């Protein structure tokens, strides 16, 4: 495969256009995910006993499952919105069939990234870049966790540096959003999730420069 450029400006420009187009729904989905999936986890971590008890570990695991489950639904919604597909609130909650694969893949991905970061950082960054698109393969192809990780690895070959730049841009935007008392994350997190979906769909299409023509204004 020839190495093709990833053009950051049109990726985020298209994502921002889609955000504005479906703003009320996106904000509602983001608040649902944040209130149900993120806030309880943060609150529990702040109030958890030290040292942890068996009960607190169980509750922490349960809250992590809820956050992952809603996170998968949020990714699904953003993926559909960049393609102007019909979405509804239940799309955040009707992913039981694919959740097990997503949970296993997320666990393996997290462990691999953490181990890589311990090994002089660079291996962790490499793993994070190459395997990052596994949720989309699970959502669209109903693949197993291992197959989804493998397909992401194949999809991202020859794009290591450019995907690193894209990743840095998404991290910077979300950090910027958090600076405004956390309120800005309501804009930046959906925007960067949409942008990631645009990169995934463009890579899968194999058309040419990224984003592909479908995702350019």
Image (spheres, rainbow, N blue to C red):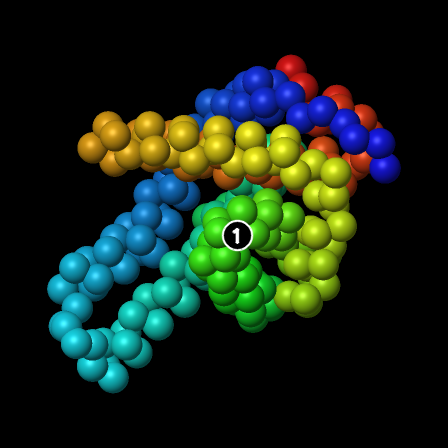
For image coordinates 54% across by 61% down, the residue present is 112
Task: Give whichever of 40, 111 is nearer the camera.
Answer: 111
For image coordinates 33% across by 43% down, the residue present is 31
The vertical placement of 118 against 82, above or below, is below
The answer to whether residue 216 is seen in the rendering is: yes
In percent of width and height, residue 75 lies at 52, 47
In percent of width and height, residue 201 lies at 70, 38
Q: In the image, 141: left or right of 46?
A: right
The vertical placement of 20 against 108, above or below, is above
For image coordinates 17% across by 76% down, the residue present is 51
Q: Residue furthest right?
A: 1
> Residue beneath label 1, please?
124
The vertical placement of 164 against 121, above or below, is above
Q: Residues within 10 Å of mark 1 (few under 14, many from 20)?
A: many
For image coordinates 37% across by 50% down, the residue present is 33
Q: In the image, 3: left or right of 144?
A: right
Where does the C terminus fall, quadrant-wise? Answer: top right
Q: In the image, 98: left or right of 119?
A: right
Where does the N terminus fall, quadrant-wise? Answer: top right
Say which quarter of the image contains residue 177: top left
Say which quarter of the image contains residue 70: bottom left
Q: In the image, 158: left or right of 168?
A: right
The vertical placement of 189 against 69, above or below, is above
Say which quarter of the image contains residue 8: top right
Helix, strand or loop for disc 1: helix
Q: Residue furthest top?
A: 217
Task: Give whichever of 11, 114 is nearer the camera.
Answer: 114
Task: Give whichever of 71, 23 is nearer the camera.
Answer: 71
The answer to whether residue 87 is seen in the rendering is: no
In percent of width and height, residue 155 lies at 74, 46
In percent of width and height, residue 129 lies at 59, 45
């Amino acid at each position: 495969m020839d190495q093709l450029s990833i053009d950051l400006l049109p990726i985020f420009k298209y994502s921002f256009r889609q955000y504005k187009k479906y703003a009320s729904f996106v904000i509602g989905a983001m608040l649902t995910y944040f209130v149900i999936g993120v806030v309880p986890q943060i609150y529990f971590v702040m109030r958890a006993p030290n040292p942890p008890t068996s009960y607190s570990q169980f509750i922490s695991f349960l809250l992590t499952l809820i956050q992952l489950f809603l996170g998968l639904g949020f990714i699904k919604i953003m993926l559909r919105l960049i393609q102007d597909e019909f979405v509804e609130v239940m799309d955040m909650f009707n992913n039981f069939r694919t959740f097990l694969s997503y949970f296993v893949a997320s666990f393996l991905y997290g462990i691999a990234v953490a181990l890589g970061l311990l090994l002089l950082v660079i291996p962790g960054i490499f793993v994070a870049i190459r395997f990052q698109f596994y949720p989309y393969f699970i959502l669209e192809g109903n693949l197993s966790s291992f197959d989804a990780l493998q397909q992401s690895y194949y999809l991202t070959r020859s794009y290591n540096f450019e995907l690193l730049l894209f990743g840095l841009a998404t991290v910077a935007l979300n950090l910027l959003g958090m600076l405004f008392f956390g309120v800005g994350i309501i804009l930046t997190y959906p925007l960067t999730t949409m942008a990631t979906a645009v990169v995934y769909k463009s890579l899968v299409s194999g058309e040419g420069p990224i984003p592909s023509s479908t995702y350019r204004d």
